[in-house]
Image: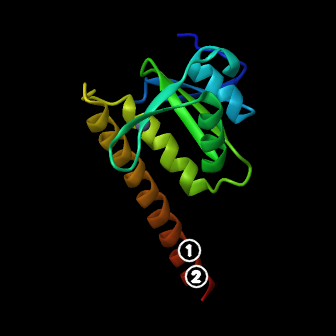
């Protein structure tokens, strides 16, 4: 499997689900490169995008607006054809938030794949929330052991 679209640097990591599964990870230098890889074309050539606001109402926005939103989030990514993870992270983005994003996108690769976009997002969000929870618990427990070892 070769996935080296866009200008992202390809790094590989081995499967999370089972020991043989290899998930290609493509890391981008900038939010724009990552978004352009998602769109499949330069920003200027992309049409408007569609999303839902907090009230569930569909609305469209320009690729430039999308880029601004992505930059504000400080990390963003997507999975292509449910087989590769594409990621971008700002230097100021904390590890917990980045882990949540990775788990969210990895969650999209897991079955069942819902036809409803809403259900698919809810499923991916659950993966993200669990990953962040595990990260925070892991950190706290590690600190507890370290404190005990010191005393
Ligand atoms: Zn998602």
Q: Quadrant of residue 76?
A: top right
Which corner quadrant holds the C terminus?
bottom right
Residue 45 visible, this angle: yes
Horizontal side, residue 150 vs residue 19: left or right: right
Task: Name the residue located 34 percent from the left edge and 49 percent from the top edge.
Answer: 55
Contact between labelled residues 2 and 1, with CB atoms less than 8 Å apart: yes
Task: Name the residue located 58 percent from the left edge and 82 percent from the top edge.
Answer: 147
Quick one: SS at disc 2?
helix
Ligand 1 closer than 8 Å to label 2 CB: no
Residue situated furthest bottom in the rendering: 151
Coloring scheme used: rainbow
- Indicate whether 54 appears above or below 108: below
Q: Foreground residue, 104 or 61?
A: 61
- Indicate whether 87 appears above or below 115: below
Q: CA distance from mark 1 to mark 2?
A: 6 Å
Q: Position of residue 6 (x, y in %)?
A: 67, 17
Q: Position of residue 56 (x, y in %)?
A: 32, 44
Q: Residues within 10 Å of mark 1 (few under 14, many from 20)?
A: few
Q: Foreground residue, 120 or 99?
A: 120
Task: Name the residue located 50 percent from the left edge and 71 percent from the top edge.
Answer: 140
- Indicate whether 86 appears above or below 45: below
Horizontal side, residue 83 vs residue 31: left or right: left
Task: Name the residue located 56 percent from the left edge and 34 percent from the top edge.
Answer: 77
Residue at numbered disc 2: 147
Horizontal side, residue 35 vs residue 138: left or right: right
Residue at numbered disc 1: 143
Q: Quadrant of residue 110?
A: top left
């Amino acid at each position: 499997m070769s996935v080296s679209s866009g200008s992202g640097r390809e790094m590989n990591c081995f499967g999370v689900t089972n020991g043989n599964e290899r998930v290609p990870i493509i890391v981008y230098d900038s939010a724009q490169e990552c978004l352009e890889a998602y769109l499949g074309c330069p920003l200027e050539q992309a049409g408007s995008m569609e999303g839902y606001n907090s009230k569930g109402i569909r609305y469209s926005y320009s690729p430039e607006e999308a880029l601004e939103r992505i930059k504000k989030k400080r990390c963003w990514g997507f999975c292509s054809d449910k087989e590769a993870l594409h990621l971008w992270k700002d230097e100021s983005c904390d590890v917990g938030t980045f882990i949540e994003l990775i788990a969210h996108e990895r969650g999209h690769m897991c079955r069942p794949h819902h036809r409803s976009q809403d259900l698919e997002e809810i499923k991916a969000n659950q993966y993200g929330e669990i990953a962040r929870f595990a990260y925070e618990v892991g950190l706290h427990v590690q600190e507890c052991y370290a404190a005990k070892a010191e005393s």
